[in-house]
Image: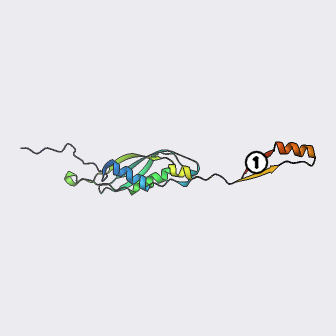
Amino acid sequence: MTEKKDKHFIKKPIYKGGNTAFRKFIKENLKYPKEALKAKIEGTVLVRYEIDYKGKVTDAKVKKGIGYGCDEEAMRVIKLLKFEVPKNPRKLRVTFHKENKINFKIPKSIQKTKKAPPQSTIQYTLTTKKKDEVEELEKKPVSYFYTIQY
């Protein structure tokens, strides 16, 4: 029986645990920039990066960004990645190029916990000194509500 030859001459680096573990790592390490939260910015950052022969991310560049600190955060998280590089025949030291999209979506927990601005309510009732008007006002009380926001 003959041995089956490997189809790929150069073996690509893989993230340990596959795509599920990759997405989990990104989700756990991604910190939403305060500037982007303030401006309510959401979107996708496309990052291109290099993986050296040891599996370490050596260079990362934003190909398509959204600004407000999201581009820098996406690069920071990508640089934390560590890949497994299978041994290549002939001991070649190959640098691999890869692209990934990092999604920024404001977490629901942050959207819900935003506090409303402080409010003051003033209530008053209008009365007069004339008896007929006082009796009439007692029948139909008039009150006004003002909400002052600052």
Residues 127 and 93: in front is 127
Where is residue 21? Give x, y as percent.
34, 52
Residue 30 at x, y percent in the picture:
45, 54
Residue 118 is drawn in which quadrant?
A: bottom right
Q: Residue at x 25, y 48 (%)?
A: 11
Q: Is residue 42 visible?
A: yes
x and y, in percent, of residue 149 in the image: 71, 51
Q: Amino acid at mark 1?
A: Tyr
x and y percent of residue 108 in the render?
Answer: 51, 49
Tell me where residue 7 sits by quadrant: top left
Query: Of helix, strand and loop, which one carries label 1?
Result: strand
Identify the residue at image location x=19%, y=52%.
90
Residue furthest right in the image: 130
Q: Which residue is mark 1?
A: 146
Name the residue nearer the viewer: 13 or 60.
13
Name the residue nearer the viewer: 132 or 85: 132
**Numbered disc total:** 1
Q: In screen coordinates, is 13 left or right of 142?
A: left
Q: Is residue 59 visible to the viewer in this orientation of the structure? A: no
Query: Tag 1: Cα neighbours inside 10 Å, few (<14), some, or many (≥20)?
Result: few
State which quarter of the image contains the N terminus. top left
In the rendered structure, the answer to whether residue 136 lies left or right of residue 112 reads right
